[in-house]
Amino acid sequence: MEYDLFNPPPAPNTVSDKQEAGIEATDNTAKSSNEKSVAERIEQLRSELHQHNYNYYVLNAPVISDQEFDKMMKELQELEAAHPEFSDPNSPTQRVGSDLGSGNFNSYAHERPMLSLGNTYNREEVRAFYDRVKDGLNGQPFDICCELKFDGLSISLIYENRNLVRALTRGDGVRGDDVTANVRTIRTLPLVLPKGVAAPERFEIRGEVLLPWSRFEALNEEREARGEALFANPRNAASGTLKSKDARVVAQRGLDAYLYYVLADKTPSDSHYANLLAARMWGFQVSDATRLTHSLDEIFDFIDYWDTARKDLPVATDGVVLKIDSLRQQEELGMTAKSPRWAIAYKFQAERARTRLNNVTFQVGRTGAVTPVANMEPVLLAGTTVRRASLHNADIINMLDLYEGDYVYVEKAGEIIPQIVGVDYDSRPLLTGKKIDFIKTCPECGTPLVRYEGEAAHYCPNSTVCPPQLKGRVEHFISRDAMNIDSLGPETIDEYFTRGLIKDAADLYNIKVEDICGEDGTRMKSAKKIVESIEASKKMPFDRVLYALGIRFVGRVSAQQIATALRDLDHIRNASLEELQAIDGIGTKIAQSIVDFFADKHATDLVNRLIKAGVQTSMPEIQLQGEQLKGKVIVISGTFTQHSREEYKEIITKHGGKNTSSISSKTSFILAGENMGPTKLQKASSLNIPLMSEEDFLKLLDE
Ligand code: IVH
């Protein structure tokens, strides 16, 4: 075949026009070739959907919007329905996406399968649902309960005799992972229902686990400071959190839960709405945005109201769920293999814009991670003008198959950082611009980039010379949560680098007023202020100094945990991997990173010069509040109601005791909360170590 301007060759890796047109391709070529293209399209959709499922459920990093995913799924369902000869039990249409198999949790069968919901995107589809229900119920009157569709992950909770006994994720809908220990940290969930509530003896309640916006933002800020990959949205952050191996991490993150479905052999009422109100009386968080409606107009009012009002909610929502209120009628309507016929989701329009991609630049951060940034024609999106969007990493660039000058879709569906979610391939110019490829060498220093196993990002390994890494580390050092030298900013740091005044953070302490007050002293006032605030930073507590060093993966919280446990710099830099790992909250990744840091010649040199400059190198002596625990070695285990674990650690030290993380013959007693792990229990009993309840412990301190 010959190509010319009107019949250009397909761009590499792109979907050809025919494939793109898919089922709608009604070209009248011979049947066999038509059939072949249907088979090809099915194959393509399946493989892409598998990949997207994996991105979403396993990597927690979707690259397309839910809406696009649903659209592809719908196309595949239609193709499979029209061509049963191509059916396949492993097709993505045959299962609900699975979050099983992270390997850390036991999985259990759900007592009743956890189905998903059919989606609608406009009024016509809602109306069609309403009419289907009307037909299905042969003209019986019916009410519809309208709820918000919370954008987190679904959870099934089992209560027996008023106690939470098990929490399962949705998993593949049939089996879920047991995340009970993690769910117990969610403060808005009742672990035990108050005595006297009229709840069934045994019931299941389902709902959504979420990370509120404020928590999500704080978490990403922390991750950014540690040089870790950011979570794309609160849902991924919540899912990553709920699947964490360490319930303490979960507790710190501050998950929340809204409940929306009560299941029992005998529920309080035939009305779903009434059951939700009952659940609220039992102590569950049921959203106030729950309405019983009696007509299509009322449903549309609810949708219209929340489409705007949801922007002020503390948690992410992505639509509305409509449920037939009467359980008897629900049963009458029944369900399909995947979703109930008595409920439907209406998805809010994601905020999206189309604009031109001018080019892609690559930024190097303080950890050396290289981030591709799309520079676009400014476009208005959800109230702000967007010019730049993160492209995250090389895999995403390849998946999108981008050319300069392409028209791209930008979305801010709850996400804070705008993302390119797709390309308008139809309007790709015939004479395309440059293909966007991930770079091979550092744009700043030319060093070949590396990609570490299991990581999506590319790094510039030249950490001791590459300018943005050097500057980035100084910027981190002076930042608010670190040494808080607020008279300096990125521009001044940049200037000092250019002038050769500094090469790293330790050099800051040698700066003199005359170095920076300008040739004729015009900047005397600000120069004095800068030198003063650098001087003042020498008083910053040691845990801030440790954080300011910018050791990979060591965030503010872990720096504090390490400093509190080991007390001074010498101890930390000579600590073994095992010693560091024994600190509560510190895992192998952080521990190894600290060991590596102090083994590095350049890092040691920096640290020595900082010590010489006079920064704090140890935590202050502890002010005792009492001596009740003098000489006692105490292990904390389980979960608590009166204080957090961190608070108990502090309480122990302030009363003269010593907190350790593992039980040995030296342990005096165990401060035992709820749900102490079985291994710890066994060890305690084999060594004859007594357990003390939270209550008794607090009593002991009161004396
Ligand atoms: S009811 C059979 N109600 O949306 C009914 N689900 O796409 C099952 N969701 O897996 C669910 N808010 O994770 C229901 N008010 C709400 C919801 C809700 C969010 C989620 C849930 C479910 C998914 C279905």
Image (cartoon, rainbow, N blue to C red):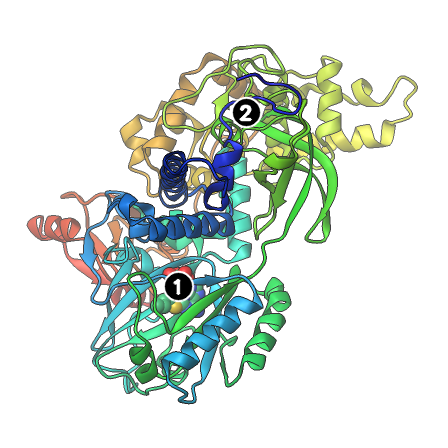
The crowd level at tag 1 (other Cα within 10 Å; few <14, some 14-19, many 20+) is some
Q: Please name the amino acid that badge 2 sits on.
A: Pro
In this picture, residue 303 sits left or right of residue 684: right
**What residue is shown at x 62% (from left), y 26% (from top)?**
403
Please state which of residues 507 and 54 is positioned toward the viewer in this rendering: 54
Q: Is residue 266 left or right of residue 214?
A: left
Q: Name the secondary structure under disc 2.
A: loop
Decide which of 161, 577 is in the foreground and name it: 161
Q: Which residue is mark 2?
A: 10
Q: Give the image location of residue 539, x and y in percent.
A: 60, 36
Q: Ligand 1 closer than 8 Å to the CB at disc 1?
A: yes
Up/down of 630 relative to 270, above or below: above
Identified at 59% across, 10% down, the residue is 446
| Residue annotated with mark 1 | 117
Q: Residues within 10 Å of mark 2 (few under 14, many from 20)?
A: few
Q: Secondary structure at mark 1?
A: loop
Residue type (three-letter) at the residue carrying disc 1: Leu
Looking at the rendered image, the quarter that the C terminus falls into is bottom left
Residue 187 image point, x, y percent = 39, 65
Quarter of image, res 164: bottom left
